[in-house]
Image (tube, rainbow, N blue to C red):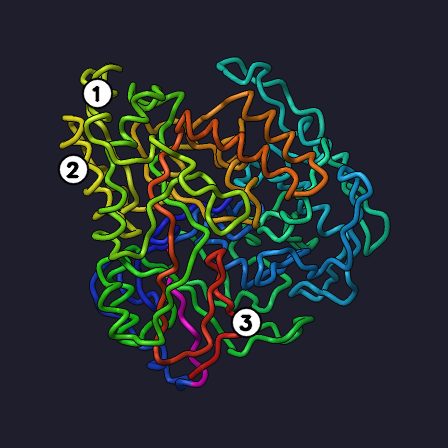
Amino acid sequence: MRVFKGAQIIAGTAVLALGLAACGGGDEATDPAASGEGAAAAPVVVEIGEPQHELVPGNTAETNGAEVLNALFIGLVNYDADKKPINQIAESITSDDQTNWTIKLKDGYKFHDGTPVDAQSFVDSWNYTANGANAYEANYFMGSITGYDEMNPVDPDGEGPQEAPAATATSLTGLKVVDPLTFTVQLKNPFSGFPTMLGYTAFYPMPKAAFGPDGKVTAAYGESPIGNGPFKMAKPWKRGVETKISLVRNDDYAEAKAKVEAVDFAIYTDLNTAYRDLQAGNIDIMDQLPPEVIASAKAELGDRYIEQPSSGIGYLGFPTKVGADYAKSPELRKAISMAIDRKTITTQVFSGTRVPADDFISPVVAGYRQGACGEACTYDPVKAKELWDANGGAQAGTIELGYNADGAHKEWIEAVANNLRTNLGATVEPKPVEKFATILDDLGADKWKGLFRMAWIMDYPSPENYLKPIFAANAGSNYSGFNNKDFEELLKKADSAPTVEEGIASYQAADDILLKELPYIPVYFYQTNAAFSSNVKNVKIDPFERIDIVNVERA
C-alpha cells in the first residue's frame, strides 16, 4: 500500500532545499549551485516529506520513501501507459493454474555493489518482508504466498485479546529457487492478478550485502540501501537528522542511463515553503502543490505546471474497533459522511482540482462505478442530522479530526469541521499532527481514537489494490480495524477468477460492503497538481505519483 501524506498523498514540508534551513522553518533556502560545483553539476532537487522508516523496500509503504526507492530500485515488472504490467527484470511470469507461478529473470542486471540480481535475491527479500518478527509495513503483500500463515499466525477468531500462537516458520514454503535466473511461487489460492502486483516496492530484490551475520537487514543498509536502479546512494541518510537524501547516477545501470548526474530529495514539512523555494529555483520538482497556490501557479508557471488524473483517493477514516463511539457505529459514520459538502470542498478549497469521491475504487482502474456510494456520499444535511440524532450522536462526544500538518490539509479539514458543526450540531476539534508518520505509528499501535485523514494511491493497477490491502483483516494498511467475513470471501472469489477482468464483479460486491459499513469515508479523488522549475525539462509523473526521474533533463 502507499498511503498519501501530503496535499497530494504524501507530500511533506520543506525542511530545506539543501538541508541548510531548519525543518519547517523560515523561507530561506540555499541555491544548489552556490556550492561552487557549477550549475551543470548541481543535483536536481525533488521535494518530498520525511519517509516513515529507513529506506528498505519491504518496510516502505508510503509515497515519500517510495519516491526515493523508485530511483534506487527496479522490479520484475513496470507498467505501460494503459497501466498494464510489462516485464522489466522478468523475462517471463507464467502459470497454468493461477496458483503455481514460474518467474524467469533476464540476465545482466546487477546491484549497485556489482553483484548479480538473481532468483535468490528476490526470494531472500520476499522471505524477510514476510517474516512477521521483522514487523515490516509491507509484510501483508506476501500474504498470498504459501507459508505466510505459518510465519504470521493470528489469534484464532481474529478479535483478540488472546495472543496469537508462535510462528512455526521463518521462510515461505511457496518460494523455491530453481536456478540462478528462475524461481517458483506457490500461492495459497488462485490469484489471476498476481503478476500485476509485482512492480510494487515490496517486491523489489535486495542483495546479500543487505543482511548481517545474524540474517537481519542491517541498520547501515537502511541508511544506504544498495539497489539495482538508475540511481545509487551518494552517502548514507539518517532519518530524523538529515533533511536531504542524495543520489548519484548509476553509470552501470543495465537499461538507459539517467539524463542527470545527481538527484537530491529535499524533505519539507510545509508545502507552501517548498513552493516558494520552487519559485526561487532552489528546488526543481514538486509532485503536488498546496491547494491555495494552484490557481496562481497555472498562470505563473505555464507549461511548467502539470495537471492530470491521479489514482489517489482522499478519505476520513475511523478506528472502528478501538475508537470513540461515533467511530464504532455504521449509522453515525454514514451521518458524518452525508454531512460533508464534497462539491464545495473540491471546487472552493481545492480550486476544482479534486473530484467528489463516490466509490472506494478509483476511476483510473477497471471496476470503478460512478455513483456507487449512493446516499452515503450525497450531501444531505437534513437526513444526516436525523440519522445522527436517531443513533445517539448527541451523546457521542467531541469529534476529533486528525490530520498531518505537513501536507496542506488544514483548509479542507477545517471545512469538514464546519460542515459537521453546522449540520450535525456536533462539537468538532481539528487535531493537527506535525508528521504523517506519527499518525501512521499511532494508528498501528491502536492509540488513535478519533477520525483521521487518510489517502491511498495505487501500488499496482487493480481494483483489488483499493480493497484488500486497506480493509482485509490483518492487512498492513488496515488502520480502521475493519473485519468482515463476507468481504473476505468476496475477495477470495474475485482473486480466483481466471482473469482480473472476470473477477471485477466480485470485487465490486466487496466494494458494496465497504460502502455500507463505511470504515472510511471517501471524500475526494485526487488529481496530480505538480510543477517544476525553469532549471529542468521533460518532467513527467505517472498515475502512481512517481516522477520519471530517469528522463528528467537539465533545461
Q: How far apart are the two marked residues, 3 and 2, measured between alpha carbons?
A: 44 Å
The answer to whether residue 115 is above or below residue 516 is: below
In this view, the mark in front (1 or 2): 1
- Label 1, label 3: how many angstroms apart (C-alpha)? 55 Å
Determine which of the numbered discs, if any, sits on residue 386 in the image: 1
Can residue 154 be seen by looking at this rendering? yes
Residue underneath mark 3: 550
Q: Position of residue 491 (x, y in %)?
A: 60, 31
- Specify few, some or many for label 3: CA neighbours under 10 Å numbering under 14, 14-19, or 20 or more: some
Query: Would residue 313 be found to the left or right of residue 280 on screen?
Result: right
Per the model, the C-alpha gap separating discs 1 and 2 is 18 Å
What quarter of the picture does the C terminus occupy?
bottom left
Q: Quadrant of residue 468?
A: top right
Give the labeled residue for mark 2.
418
Q: Residues within 10 Å of mark 2 (few under 14, many from 20)?
A: some
Tell me if mark 1 has few (under 14), some (14-19) or many (20+) residues whose alpha carbon lies within 10 angstroms of its own: few
Task: Check if residue 28 falls in the magenta segment.
Answer: no
Q: Position of residue 143 (x, y in %)?
A: 64, 34
| For the residues bearing labels 3 and 2, Cβ distance under 8 angstroms | no
Q: Nearer the viewer, residue 524 or 116?
A: 524
- 63 over 254 or under it: above or below: above
